[in-house]
Amino acid sequence: MTPDTALSDRQLMVSRLIEGPRDLVFEAFTEVRHLSQWWGPKGFTTTTRTFEFSKGGVWEFTMHGPDGTDYPNWIQWTEIRAPEVIVLRHGEGPDDPEQFSSTFFFEERTDGTQVILRSEFKTKTLRDRAAEEYGAIEGGNQTLESLGTYVTGSLE
Amino acid sequence: MISDMARARTTADAFNAIAEPHRREILTLLRGRERVVSDIANAMGMNQPAVSKHLRVLREVGLVYVHPDGKQRRYGLDAQGLEPVHGWTGGFEEYWSESLERLNTHVKERKREEER
């Protein structure tokens, strides 16, 4: 499996060089104590109800937005090839009709590990919507902006 | 972060870099996969030195990374550089740019702990 093919109109991709060895980067995806440190945008926290990192295993958690809004999350791992590939299904729950599939590739580089995420949605419409509003970022953004204003204001 | 800012010229930020249409075209080409310079030049109908110049600007602002692959150098999109741009747009890429930024911080901390 390689991430080096063209994107379809149902996919989104993002990639980032992580400054650490691949084993360490991969490990950050395999345990709640690590995932809770980084999963989600700035200002978000997670509470985990169930977690089993194995093929067919499930991670059920709630994401708490900076404004206090809760977002239900359900993830099931469908393929795990340590330390190279993780494939998962992601939605609000096991019966969410808008579930999508995400593949994380971990590639060794001289200066770290390139993490490549490719998500595939059921339709182009769902993909386009995710590109604009995903994980209720819009609301979170406004909150962060107001928080930023609040902090700046209190410094003056 | 501070050292990055010190290194960059005042005009060299992601927004300035993507103001140039050819550079946007390059980023679009790199969206799905890594490419070598000749591949980009062919796709755009431009000569390689011109493409290399644009790639250099895109690298300077961290929009593009380079990955040596044998004799070739492959170029790809770097989410880190796109972060300020996505800060404006929201959605999937912002969610993941920010998450992966946090992942990077987390991994760097764990690396330091291990080295102690």
Image (cartoon, grey):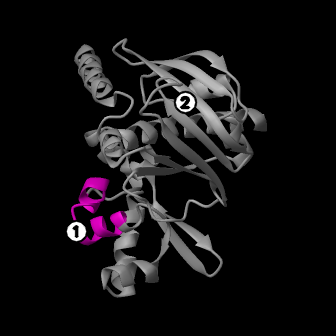
Q: Quadrant of residue B71?
A: bottom right
Chain name for mark 2: A
Q: Is residue B26 magenta?
A: yes
Labels 1 & 2 near each other (Cβ < 8 A): no
| Residue type beneath disc 1 | Pro
Q: Quadrant of residue B13?
A: bottom left
Q: What is the number of the mark on residue B66?
A: none
Residue A54 position (above or below residue B2): above
Residue B74 position (above or below residue A52): below
Residue A54 position (above or below residue A13): above
On the picture, is A97 further left or further right than B108?
left
Q: Quadrant of residue A44?
A: top left
Label 1: which secondary element: helix
B81 or B46: nearer the viewer: B46
Percent across and percent down for residue A35 are 61, 28
| Residue type beneath disc 2 | Trp
Q: Residues within 10 Å of mark 1 (few under 14, many from 20)?
A: few
Chain name for mark 1: B
Percent across and percent down for residue B56 are 40, 71
Tell me what residue is drawn at x 61 percent, y 31 percent: A76
Quarter placement of the N terminus of chain B: top left
Find the magenta span and give its range: B11-28
Tell me what residue is drawn at x 46 percent, y 65 percent: A6
B60 or B107: nearer the viewer: B107
Q: What is the number of the mark on residue B21?
A: 1
Percent across and percent down for residue A137 are 34, 30
Q: Mostly what secondary structure, the magenta segment? A: helix
Tell me what residue is drawn at x 70 percent, y 25 percent: A52
Label 2: which secondary element: helix
On the picture, is A95 further left or further right than B108?
left
Q: Which residue is mark 2?
A: A38
